[in-house]
């Protein structure tokens, strides 16, 4: 919507993660091609299912079509399945950073990370300056996101 204003908060990258229990039972993939032997937990939006995961192999982008027995339009549900050891998930670093730090999740295939231009942005009605309480919230969020580098 062109009437909205936006404020950049942070860069956002996606990471492939799994619970240690899943990896102990099914093994840890060492190459993106190994994902065809793993249960991949995917997101869907309407009829679109995010089954094409991008990796960097030998300096080039490689798309792997993944499959799995669970898909949801709810990112929190996909994270819950992943934490419960049901498979691998491609998640926003902002969504899983706490679980990575605690060891509940482990990053997988980090050497094959494909950088994508993705950002966390705050959208708000444009055209007029926001009320002070909203501006304070925007400034607080920008400062909070700015403290973290993932």
Image: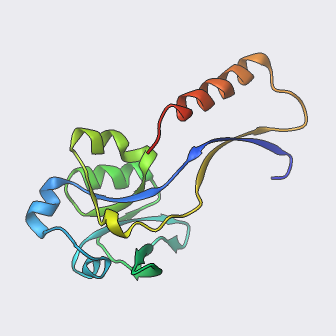
Residue occupying image coordinates x 42% and y 45%: 95
Front residue of 26 and 32: 32
Q: In the image, is 141 to the left or to the right of 107?
A: right
Please, which residue is most extreme toward the left here? Answer: 25
Q: In the image, is 33 to the left or to the right of 75?
A: left
User: Can you give x and y, in whole percent of width and height, for residue 45 in the image?
Assistant: 54, 64
Compared to residue 101, the image places residue 45 above or below, namely below
User: Can you give x and y, in whole percent of width and height, for residue 142 in the image?
Assistant: 62, 31
Compared to residue 67, the image places residue 86 above or below, namely above
User: Can you give x and y, in whole percent of width and height, for residue 9 in the image?
Assistant: 62, 39
Q: In the image, is 67 to the left or to the right of 130?
A: left
Q: Quadrant of residue 91?
A: bottom left
Residue occupying image coordinates x 31% and y 77%: 32
Please, which residue is most extreme toward the top here? Answer: 132
Residue occupying image coordinates x 29% and y 71%: 69
User: Can you give x and y, in whole percent of width and height, for residue 20 in the image?
Assistant: 16, 54
Please, which residue is most extreme toward the right here? Answer: 127
Q: Quick one: quadrant of the C terminus?
A: top left
Residue occupying image coordinates x 13% and y 69%: 27
Q: In the image, is 81 to the left or to the right of 113?
A: left
């Amino acid at each position: 919507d062109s009437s909205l204003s936006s404020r950049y908060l942070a860069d956002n990258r996606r990471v492939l993660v799994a619970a240690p229990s899943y990896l102990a039972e099914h093994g840890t993939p060492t190459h993106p091609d190994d994902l065809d032997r793993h249960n991949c937990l995917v997101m869907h939006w309407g009829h679109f299912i995010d089954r094409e995961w991008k990796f960097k192999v030998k300096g080039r982008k490689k798309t792997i079509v993944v499959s799995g027995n669970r898909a949801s339009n709810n990112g929190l549900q996909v994270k819950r399945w992943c934490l419960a050891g049901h498979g691998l998930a491609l998640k926003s670093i902002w969504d899983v950073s706490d679980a990575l730090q605690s060891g509940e999740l482990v990053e997988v295939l980090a050497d094959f990370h494909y950088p994508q231009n993705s950002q966390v942005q705050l959208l708000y009605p444009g055209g007029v300056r926001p009320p002070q309480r909203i501006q304070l919230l925007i400034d607080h969020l920008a400062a909070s996101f700015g403290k973290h580098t993932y």
